[in-house]
Image (cartoon, rainbow, N blue to C red):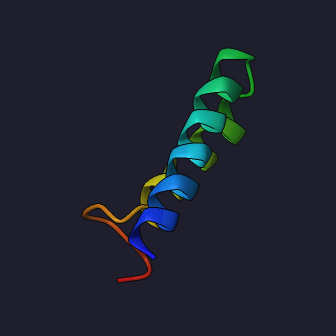
Amino acid sequence: MGTLLFIIAAILVIAGVVSLLRGQLLWGIVLIVVGLLVGPGGYSIFG
């Protein structure tokens, strides 16, 4: 489960960075924050 969450979080963060580079500031920030919340790191909303 941790590996799956890490992959999902990585995809979200990468998509957020790409959105920032394309000029979509708000959407990029939202994706990055959600990616950090989903990830198995310190701030996981799934425990």
> Residue at the left extreme?
42
Quarter of the image that includes the C terminus? bottom left
- Give the tally of numbered discs: 0
The answer to whether residue 43 is above or below residue 17 is below
Residue at 65% of width from left, 16% of height from top?
Answer: 21
Residue at 60% of width from left, 47% of height from top?
Answer: 12
- In percent of width and height, residue 1 lies at 46, 76
Residue at 70% of width from left, 28% of height from top?
Answer: 19
Horizontally, residue 47 falls left or right of residue 3, namely left
Residue at 57% of width from left, 57% of height from top?
Answer: 8
The answer to whether residue 34 is above or below residue 40 is above
For the residue pair 42 and 25, the one nearer the viewer reads as 42
- In percent of width and height, residue 34 lies at 55, 57
- In percent of width and height, residue 39 lies at 42, 61
**Which of the 4 image quadrants contains residue 44?**
bottom left
Horizontally, residue 40 falls left or right of residue 21, namely left
For the residue pair 17 and 11, the one nearer the viewer reads as 11
